[in-house]
Structure formats: structure tokens, C-alpha cells
Image (spheres, rainbow, N blue to C red):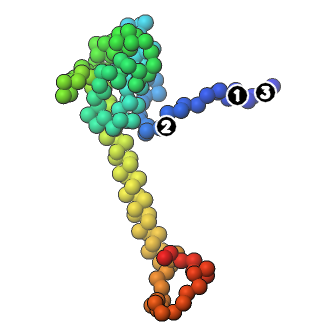
Amino acid sequence: MDNELPVPAYKLTTPAAGWFKTPAAIGSDQVFLRVPDDLRLGAVGLFISSLGWALNHNAQNGWIPAPAVYFGQLTAAPREQLEATAEALVVAGLWAKASIDGLEGFVVAGAQQAVQERFARQQSASRAGQSSQVVQAKKDPVNRFPPRTEKPNPDKPVDWSSVSEDL
């Protein structure tokens, strides 16, 4: 019996902007029971897409402009379906309508926290890399490019073909 699983034909083409914590059973979370049955699957997908959009666009306040939702930046679907699903997410309390500088949009529940956690992970990784570099420099004081031991003489001819250090 062959136990190898088939390989999917396609991979995501959008580069990863980060990751966010989501419940393993997000599709059956009780909050989505507030969404009508015919829109529930789309609501779960649009909600997850909105968290990804917030990460990709560094939406530190969790706000997404309505045109990004209605014109396919979050997910490709007919506009009427996106509008109905967005309204269902508002009614369910997962999105809140908000306007910034006269542009209508939505605040996504959990998006602000996801973006803040992403920045915290980046800062932590940066600090870890810097401290690792300091520790490594203390352990291995030998420099790959040691300073010159002799002072260059401008009157002395140099065979540049034998010089391999940084100039």
C-alpha cells in the first residue's frame, strides 16, 4: 500500500509578512456563530485575511480601509459578497466600522495585538543577534581583516596583484 500523500500543484505566491496566533479551531469559534450560515465560511476567511493584511501593511491600530476590503486586496471575491461578509463581521463584533481622515474602514479585532507582537518578535531577534555578535567577538578576538602592521610608503612601488585585503 502506497502511503505517500499527493503534492499540491501550487504554492502561495505572496511573501510571508509575519505570523499571528490563531486558535486551532478558529472555524468553529463561537463568535462566528453570530454570522449567518451562508456567510460563515467567507467570514472566517475574510477575518483571517484581514489579520494578514494588517501584518503586511503594519496597521498598528488594526484599521483596514474599506476600499482594500471591497476591491480585492484582502481576498478576491465579488464585491457584493465582500460587502455582505464585512457587514456580517461588523454585526458579529469582530470588526468595527471606523473612519480615519475621512476614509471609511474597519478596525479588526486582534489585528493591533498581532502587529505589536510581530514588532516585539523582530526587536527580540534583533537584540539577540546583536548580543550574540558581541559574545562572539569576545570569544574570537581575531579579526578577519587585521589592521596593517606597517605604515604605507607612498614612494614605494606596490604589486597590487598580490594585495588581497580591503583597500
Is residue 97 shown left or right of residue 40?
left
Question: In the figure, residue 131 lies in which quadrant?
Answer: bottom left
Q: Amino acid at mark 2?
A: Pro
Residue 119 appears in view: yes
Residue type, label 1: Leu
Question: Is residue 146 rendered to the left or right of residue 100?
Answer: right
Nearer the viewer's eye, disc 3 or disc 2? Answer: 2
- The answer to whether residue 17 is above or below residue 129 is above
Residue displayed at 24% across by 21% down = 104
Q: Residue at x 34, y 46 (%)?
A: 120
Whole-percent x and y of residue 162? 61, 82
Question: Residue tagged by mark 2?
Answer: 15
Few, some or many residues within 10 Å of mark 3 (<14, 14–19, 20+): few
Marks 3/2: CA–CA distance: 33 Å
Q: Judge by depth and name the residue closer to the eye, 108 or 33.
A: 108
- Please state which of the two labelled residues, at mark 1 or mark 2, is closer to the viewer: 2
Secondary element at image label 2:
loop
Q: Are marks 1 and 2 in contact (CB under 8 Å)?
A: no
Q: CA distance from mark 1 to mark 2?
A: 25 Å
Residue type, numbered disc 3 = Asp
Label 3 vs 2, first from the N-terminus: 3
Measuring from the top left, give residue 60's x and y in whole percent.
28, 37
Q: Which residue is the site of mark 3?
A: 2
Q: Which residue is mark 1?
A: 5
